[in-house]
């Protein structure tokens, strides 16, 4: 087994040079999922957002996130919604379509085009692993023996969703029968905008052994790599739900980053492998790594319905306390970590230090974050601006500004709103510091007066 594992790693790293050039720098892209619909246990489906409503949320989110580069994967876009009809993914949920379109696919393609106006790439959340017995492809997958099996020859069940058993697709047999390639080719032909998006997300993409076929998990993982390379040959990055060490170089991004430990963060830069968050449900994970090295925010749990009053406050808090720091740290080299447990400090290039004990982010003598109050550079913008946010009211507080502000004497302060930036006032810096009163849970943005807002 050890020799097989070593072989797998050699194959992985041997291919790394050819696959590491991805379409996006995911370390400088906010990646999220947007939940649209799911099957109703009573029949039909439950709709959270239609395609048209999804664009409204994207537009509002673009303003609240200060135009940050975004990739949004749509969950439940197909058939009756999330986890429905796999391994097929060849039609859109008709309940999500616009009234002016003849088909839901037309509405989906419209959304993908329109979202580009808001610094957003819209793509799809699919599944390359699960098979359900009500799928249009089920009979073919059983007839051609494309489902993994237990030692007794029974089909391998890996879960139950929407009151239906999910079966493990056999990656090797599916590939060799040409069905992996068929699924990919058919989806890309069905939705041409996907190729322009250049990215797609595979949920629960996990390799498992097929004892009934005498196939090891290593064998299945090799065919997972083949599938990733095939997506790449079509001009597509494929991202995944969980971090997989054997997919480094093939997959640039994972939804849950629990699988990385501290040594992994130091070994692999965010430009090689990054993720949105550390799943809080897995208690054994080192959750402190999210603060030490930066973590993004999911988006999906807070986008409940089209009325922003239902999600604006929760989104602002989650985004502001995570994403600016995530982007800022991801641009730096990860040098080392000192200390143990809650006393750890992460050391980065350019004099940046993150301290877990007192929840600070500093650059040399300047403090960009103190617990949940921050004045963090918005590195994705070209105006040298800083995000200002605090969970609590800040009365007459001094904030350090980045070194690239130089010796500017004044700054423009804006309120970040659903409708965009709203000018508040001009502020005079005192000894290189911004002295401000901030309302708690309210996002602000400050720009040195010698630059202009984009």
Image (cartoon, rainbow, N blue to C red):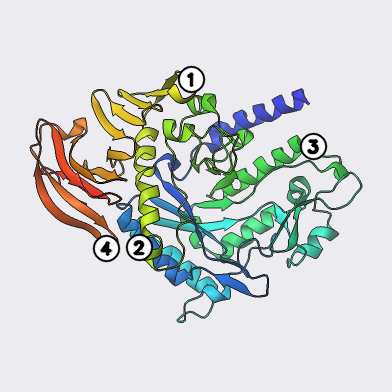
Local SS, label 4: loop
Q: Which residue is mark 3?
A: 216
Residue located 37% across and 64% down the image: 308
Residue 434: quadrant of the picture: top left
- Per the model, the C-alpha gap separating discs 3 and 2 is 46 Å
Q: Nearer the viewer, residue 136 or 324?
A: 324
Q: Position of residue 360 (x, y in %)?
A: 33, 30
**Camera-side mark, 1 or 3:** 1
Q: Earlier in the sequence, mark 4 or mark 3?
A: 3
Q: Residue furthest right?
A: 152
Q: Which residue is mark 1?
A: 340
Q: Position of residue 148 (x, y in %)?
A: 81, 49
- Per the model, the C-alpha gap separating discs 1 and 4 is 44 Å
**Camera-side mark, 1 or 2:** 1
Q: Nearer the viewer, residue 350 or 321?
A: 321
The answer, for residue 381, to whether it is visible in the render is no
Q: Earlier in the sequence, mark 1 or mark 4?
A: 1
Residue located 26% across and 30% down the image: 367
Q: Are marks 4 and 3 in contact (CB under 8 Å)?
A: no
Local SS, label 1: loop
Residue 89: quadrant of the picture: bottom right
Residue count near mark 3 (Cα–Cα under 10 Å), binned few <14, some 14–19, many ≥20: some
Q: Are marks 1 and 4 in contact (CB under 8 Å)?
A: no
User: Left or right of 30: which side holds 66?
Assistant: left
Marker disc for residue 59 = 2
Residue count near mark 2 (Cα–Cα under 10 Å), binned few <14, some 14–19, many ≥20: many
Marker disc for residue 419 = 4
Q: Note whether 335 is above or below 99 in the view shown.
A: above
Q: Earlier in the sequence, mark 3 or mark 2?
A: 2
């Amino acid at each position: 087994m050890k020799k097989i594992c070593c072989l797998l790693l050699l194959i992985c790293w041997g291919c790394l040079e050819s696959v590491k050039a991805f379409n996006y720098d995911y370390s400088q892209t906010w990646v999220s999922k947007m939940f649209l619909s799911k099957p109703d246990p009573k029949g039909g489906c439950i709709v959270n957002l239609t395609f048209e409503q999804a664009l409204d949320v994207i537009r509002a989110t673009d303003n609240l996130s200060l135009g940050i580069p975004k990739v949004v994967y749509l969950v439940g876009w197909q058939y009756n919604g999330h986890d429905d009809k796999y391994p097929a993914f060849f039609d859109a949920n008709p309940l999500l379509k616009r009234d002016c379109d003849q088909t839901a696919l037309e509405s989906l393609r419209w959304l993908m085009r329109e979202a580009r106006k808001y610094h957003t790439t819209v793509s799809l959340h699919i599944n390359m692993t699960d098979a359900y017995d009500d799928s249009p492809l089920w009979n073919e997958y059983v007839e051609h023996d494309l489902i993994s099996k237990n030692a007794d020859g029974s089909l391998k069940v890996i879960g139950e969703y929407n009151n239906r058993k999910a079966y493990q697709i056999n990656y090797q047999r599916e590939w060799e029968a040409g069905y992996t390639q068929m699924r990919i080719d058919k989806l890309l032909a069905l939705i041409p905008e996907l190729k322009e998006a250049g990215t797609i997300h595979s949920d629960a993409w996990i390799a498992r052994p097929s004892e009934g076929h005498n196939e090891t998990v290593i064998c299945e993982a090799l065919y997972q790599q083949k599938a990733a390379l095939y997506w790449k040959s079509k001009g597509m990055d494929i991202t995944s739900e969980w971090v997989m060490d054997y997919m480094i170089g093939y997959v640039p991004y994972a939804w849950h980053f629990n699988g990385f430990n501290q040594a992994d963060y130091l070994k692999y830069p965010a430009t090689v492998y990054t993720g949105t968050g550390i799943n809080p449900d897995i208690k054994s994970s080192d959750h402190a790594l999210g603060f030490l090295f930066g973590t993004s925010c999911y988006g999906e749990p807070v986008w409940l319905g089209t009325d922003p009053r239902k999600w604006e406050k929760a989104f602002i808090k989650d985004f502001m306390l995570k994403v600016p720091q995530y982007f800022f740290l991801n641009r730096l080299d990860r040098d080392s970590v000192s200390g143990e447990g809650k006393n750890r400090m992460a050391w980065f290039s350019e004099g940046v230090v993150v301290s877990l004990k007192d929840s600070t982010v500093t650059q040399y003598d300047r403090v960009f974050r103190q617990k949940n109050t921050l004045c963090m550079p918005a590195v994705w913008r070209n105006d040298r601006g800083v995000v200002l946010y605090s969970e609590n009211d800040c009365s007459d507080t001094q904030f350090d500004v980045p070194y690239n502000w130089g010796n500017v004497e004044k700054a423009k302060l804006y309120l970040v709103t659903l409708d965009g930036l709203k000018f508040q006032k001009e502020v005079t810096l005192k000894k290189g510091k911004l002295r401000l009163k901030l309302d708690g849970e309210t996002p602000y943005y400050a720009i040195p007066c010698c630059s202009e807002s984009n």
